[in-house]
Image (spheres, rainbow, N blue to C red):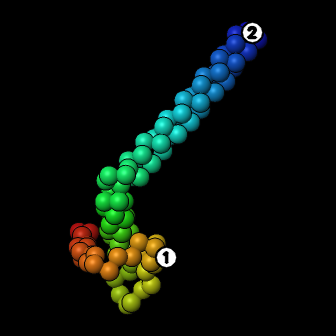
Amino acid sequence: MHDIRQELTSSAIRHARRVRRTTGRLVVSGLGFGLAYYFDAENGAARREQLRQSLRRVALTIDSVWAPETGDPPAVFTPLLRGLSSEDYEPRPVQRHEAS
């Protein structure tokens, strides 16, 4: 009984190491492909600008959903929005859904 438990434990440990190693390889590979995609010499600048605009829209949407309805509350993502500022971008108003 002791040998079977020990074999199961060592097998589980080997499997966990293999999973961790494979996950690390996938993450590094994904980061490499992402960097190559966004820093491409031909289209990288346009892709990065599109990513900035998308992140700004997401931040504004989250901020408007989390902000209370009354008063003039401070923005939740003000530092993030300052970093993503673009003068020519006009945010769309977010419609709130009322719970029935």
Q: Residue at x 32, y 80 (%)?
A: 87
> Quadrant where the C terminus lies?
bottom left
Quarter location, residue 70: bottom left
Q: How far across and how far down the image is residue 7, in percent?
A: 70, 13
Which of the two residues, 80 or 61, is positioned nearer the viewer here?
80
Q: What is the number of the mark on residue 79? A: 1
Quarter location, residue 50: bottom left
Q: How far across and how far down the image is residue 76, in percent?
A: 45, 76
Q: How far across and how far down the image is residue 15, in percent?
A: 60, 22
Q: Identify the residue under disc 2.
A: 3
User: What secondary structure is marked by label 1?
Assistant: helix
Mark 2 residue crowding within 10 angstroms, few (<14) / some (14–19) / many (20+): few
Q: Residue at x 37, y 52 (%)?
A: 41
Q: Residue at x 32, y 66 (%)?
A: 53
Position of 6 with respect to 62 (left or right) is right
Which of the two residues, 52 or 75, is positioned nearer the viewer here?
52
Label 1 to label 2: alpha-carbon separation: 58 Å
User: What secondary structure is marked by label 2?
Assistant: helix
Tell me the amino acid under the disc marked 1: Pro
User: Of callouts 1 and 2, which one flags the residue occurring earlier in the amino acid sequence?
Assistant: 2
Q: Residue at x 69, y 20 (%)?
A: 9
- Vertical relation: 67 (above or below) 6: below
Q: How far across and how far down the image is residue 3, in percent?
A: 75, 9
Tell me the amino acid under the disc marked 2: Asp
- Residue at the right extreme of this rendering: 2
